Image (cartoon, rainbow, N blue to C red):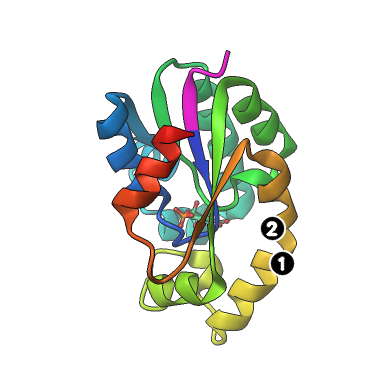
Amino acid sequence: MKDNIALIGFMGSGKTTIGKILAKYLDMKFIDTDKMISAQEKKSIPEIFAEKGEQYFRQLEREIVLHESMNNNIVISTGGGVIIDNENIKNLKETSFVVYLDCTIECIYNRVKNSKSRPLLNVDDMFEKIKELHDKRQLLYEISCDFKVKIDVDSNMYDTAEKIKKA
Ligand code: S3P
């Protein structure tokens, strides 16, 4: 049963901010998988990547997605890489109305360019890295979602949450 709403999309697309608003609008509980991983490990996401590696992080992410998607009536904000794992896609699709926040590359870059909390973007040419990862992942976001909402620099997060609520 699709009792939950899962937000997927690239880093910086607004999954956490919009998810919180949406949860309020719909009177649902909100959870953020990255926050849960951090709390469980008592470490920041960059610390987990640096000390234990990406594979370790992905394993925790898979466990949390599996566990949380068995809940009812929650809005799940996922990490941008959740869709690189088939098991996650399957679990989310079975249990949640999956919404893809399809944010333009320019908008993503503007939002994340000063961020230190995204280890995968911690490279010299961040814009190129975003483009490369985005190209690799876009199709996965598309095939994983039940509903897509476009986001650009002029988008308003309350309007976006409203569109998702209506859908
Ligand atoms: C990741 C996105 C991050 C976080 C981790 C890996 C990714 O979450 O899960 O740094 O692979 O895209 P946000 O999408 O919330 O930034």
Q: Can residue 38 be seen at all in this image of the molecule?
A: no
**Residue 135 numbered tag:** 1
Task: State left or right for residue 95 relative to residue 27.
Answer: right
Do the numbered discs 1 and 2 sit on residues whose CB atoms are within 8 Å? yes
Where residue 107 sits: x, y (%)? 46, 72
Part of the protein shown in magenta:
1-5
- Foreground: 16 or 117? 16
Q: Please tell me which residue is depicted at 43% across the width and 15% down the height of the picture.
A: 72
Residue drawn at (67%, 35%) of the image: 89
Real-space Cα separation, disc 1 to disc 2, in angstroms: 6 Å
Q: What is the secondary structure assignment of the residue under circle 1?
A: helix
For mark 2, give the secondary structure: helix
Q: Which residue is drawn at 58% across and 13% down?
A: 1
Residue type at mark 2: give it. Answer: Gln
- Which residue is more in the foreground, 42 or 19? 19
Tell me the kind of residue under disc 1: Asp
Residue 146, position as x, y percentages in the image: 62, 35
2 drawn magenta = yes
Please check the rendered image and state whether residue 80 is part of the magenta-colored stretch, yes or no. no
Asked if 121 appears above or below 9 in the picture, the reply is below
Asked where in the image residue 99 lies, by quadrant, the reply is: top right
Could you say where residue 73 lies in the image, as x and y percent from the top left? 40, 19
Q: Position of residue 56 (x, y in %)?
A: 59, 45
Other residues around mark 2 within 10 Å, as few (<14) / some (14–19) / many (≥20): some
69 vs 119, nearest the viewer = 69
Residue at the spot of label 2: 138
| Up-down relation of residue 3 to residue 139 (above or below) | above
